[in-house]
Image (cartoon, grey):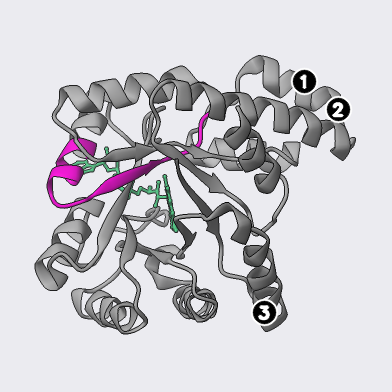
Amino acid sequence: MKLSAEFFPPRTAEGLDKLVEVAEGFRPFNLDYLSVTYGAGGSTQERTLATVKALRARGWDVAPHLTCVDSERGKIADLLKTYMDLGVHRIVALRGDIPSGMRDLGDFNFAIDLVKFIRDSTGDHFHIEVAAYPEVHPQAKNWQTDLQHFADKMAAGANAAITQYFFNPDSYCRFVNAARDLGVKGDIIPGLMPITNHDQLVRFSDACGAEIPRWLRKRLEAFGDDKAAISELGLEVVSDIGERVMRGGAPGVHYYAMNSIEPTRSLIERLRSF
Ligand SMILES: Cc1cc2nc3c(=O)[nH]c(=O)nc-3n(C[C@H](O)[C@H](O)[C@H](O)COP(=O)(O)OP(=O)(O)OC[C@H]3O[C@@H](n4cnc5c(N)ncnc54)[C@H](O)[C@@H]3O)c2cc1C
């Protein structure tokens, strides 16, 4: 079972030390890698790099995320070289969200352009992962074109994909079947988001287009500020999704760990024991 966890780069040196300790908590699970997000336009470039270095120094296999919107080929090439020198062999290649009002996107329009650039400039050095959207990317024209763009991105040289999080396991299974029908071969790893905070979850989900089912939204709302109750329900719901996607043939799970050991550790324990 392929397992990975995603972190975001901390803002301070103390935050980074804490994150390195959080990562140690995942050591017993033999994760395939840890991924580190990257702000669109390179806004977190230094912090992402510092986080990647700190985790590499502890021997982790790290997959830096790399967004291409508002970027230049030269800058991306330099960063790829830095990662190669650090012994990084994985990249999560993304377009990034387009800041409102931006007209000139830079040297890359879509993630597919970044995938091609990485392949052209570094050959087979990197295992490239791209993003997938079982519930359709929020800016997509429609479901079919979004799926076709995903298939094209995979065919351009990506090895595998990680999905946006979802709470409806059917959306993942249907997406994978539809992608296979278009000839997509690589792993499509479901991304699962632990539930710990109602307001934050609603905010993230509205922004990224992940649907929170009405029944789940209502139950979470009813808990108000009761964090323990939210976490307990979250553990049950997200464990159930993990189990269902694994039964549906998923090769593993990528957890949006939000820089915390819990509840991801408990979710992994439950997933491994089902
Ligand atoms: C696993 C995962 C990790 C992420 N990590 C980060 C991160 O670290 N930092 C960050 O800023 N964001 C991150 N994101 C968010 C991501 O950057 C946004 O969702 C962004 O809006 C799209 O990025 P993409 O790589 O999916 O883009 P693309 O694959 O380029 O798709 C973007 C949109 O363009 C459309 N499209 C693609 N190709 C074409 C074409 N040729 N013609 C017309 N339309 C096209 C697609 O249908 C889609 O609607 C992540 C998302 C996921 C799922």
Whether residue 185 sits left or right of residue 250 in the image: it is left
- Asked if residue 167 shows in the view, the reply is no
Q: Residues within 10 Å of mark 1 (few under 14, many from 20)?
A: some
**Image: 95 above or below 152:** below
Magenta stretch bounds: 150-167
Residue type at mark 2 is Phe
125 vs 15, nearest the viewer = 125
Query: Which circle marks residue 219 in the picture?
Result: 1
Q: Quadrant of residue 78?
A: bottom left
9 vs 160, nearest the viewer = 160
Q: Earlier in the sequence, mark 3 or mark 2?
A: 3
Tell me what residue is drawn at x 40 percent, y 71 percent: 42
Q: Quadrant of residue 154?
A: top left
The kind of secondary structure element at disc 1 is helix
Gap in angstroms between the C-alphas marked 1 and 3: 36 Å
Tell me what residue is drawn at x 37 percent, y 82 percent: 86
Q: Residues within 10 Å of mark 2 (few under 14, many from 20)?
A: some
108 vs 230, nearest the viewer = 230
Gap in angstroms between the C-alphas marked 3 and 2: 33 Å
- Asked if residue 157 lies in the magenta stretch, the reply is yes
Name the residue that disc number 3 marks. 12
Gap in angstroms between the C-alphas marked 1 and 2: 7 Å
Tell me what residue is drawn at x 31 percent, y 61 percent: 69
Instruction: Tell me residue 112's x, y (percent).
Output: 19, 51
